[in-house]
Amino acid sequence: AAGVKVIDLAADFRLKDTAEFERWYRMPHACPDILAEAVYGLPEVKREAIRNARVIGLPGCYPTSVQLGFLPVLDPAAVAAVGGDLVERDSLIADCKSGASGAGRKAEVHTLLAEAGDNFRAYSVAGHRHLPEIRQGLSAIAGKPVSLVFTPHLVPMVRGIFSTLYARLTPAGRQVDLQALYENRFAGEPFVDVMPAGSTPETRSVRASNIARIAVHRPPDSDLLMVLVVEDNLVKGASGQGVQAMNLMFGLPEGTGLDQVPVLP
């Protein structure tokens, strides 16, 4: 209908290449004619485009955490400031863990309490459907090709994502104050919290909130950057991000309906 705006929580409007969509989701794309106008709904990257969009494809839960975690070191402004890449773009690693709700509510053996409880395992190691979305998003941020290894894990909890990200720093990147870089990039972002240096986030610290919490580390005697990211996969990784996008689309304060604090314990 004319004038109707759409915010899609499924995957149909995430990938811009229909062949890529059909390869990973094993179904034909239902509306490729609309795909071209769809805006990827990650506000920290696409805020102004979201304001003017008619169709939003919301990011997946894992892609949200990985893109936010790598965003400051791939941002062209940061690259330009030092005269070259801060990290090696062809060797990024995303080691991610999710609670069982990330699989939805469908009945599957691997998410039964007797299977998922008291257990911790990797899955889709040969290739997860969020991989092309992450790669597409990071490449769009950098304006250059980006490749990475992405390994998801199922952990015995209901909700929450913990992504541990690794990037090898270039000589230019080793000279940068990485803590300050992250703090400055996310300054003013209402739903991204860069923790003090040396901190380690916990999934329960963001439970039921729209907050992504980030900690930046440089392991001793190493040229690696390590970024820890936590989010609630059901809120910042899904419905909360949808409300955030809706607020932008309709000219409402971005935090409307999203100011609840994390539920602890």
Image (spheres, rainbow, N blue to C red):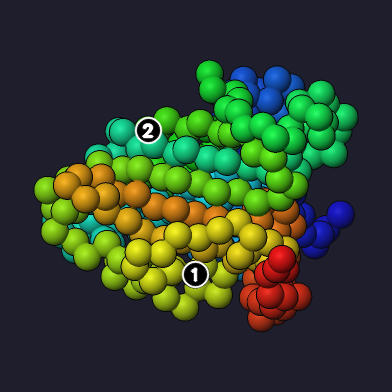
How many other residues sit within 10 Å of disc 1, few (<14), some (14-19) or many (≥20)? some
Question: Between 105 and 110, which is closer to the camera in this rendering?
Answer: 110
Image location (x, y in percent) of residue 58: 66, 51
Q: Which mark is residue 193?
A: 1
For the image, the number of numbered tags is: 2
Residue 241's place in the image compared with 257, above or below, is above
Secondary structure, mark 2, is loop
Q: Residue at x 31, y 43 (%)?
A: 167
Image location (x, y in percent) of residue 68: 47, 55
Give the image quarter of residue 33: top right
Give the image quarter of residue 111: top right
Question: Between 81 and 178, which is closer to the camera in this rendering?
Answer: 178
Q: Residue at x 70, y 68 (%)?
A: 264
Residue 265's place in the image compared with 15, above or below, is below
Q: Amino acid under label 2?
A: Ser
Quick check: marks 1 and 2 in contact, CB under 8 Å? no
Residue 109's place in the image compared with 143, above or below, is above
Q: Nearer the viewer, mark 1 or mark 2?
A: 1
Residue under label 2: 147
Give the image quarter of residue 93: top left
Residue 214's place in the image compared with 29, above or below, is below
Q: Amino acid under label 1?
A: Asp
- Regarding residue 30, the answer to whether it shows in the image is no
Image location (x, y in percent) of residue 134: 50, 40
Q: Which mark is residue 220?
A: none
Question: Between 97 and 147, which is closer to the camera in this rendering?
Answer: 97
Secondary structure, mark 1, is strand
Q: Quadrant of the N terminus?
A: bottom right
Question: Between 31 and 145, which is closer to the camera in this rendering?
Answer: 145
Alpha carbons under labels 1 and 2: distance apart = 26 Å
Of the numbered discs 1 and 2, the one sitting upstream in the chain is 2
Image location (x, y in percent) of residue 116: 74, 32
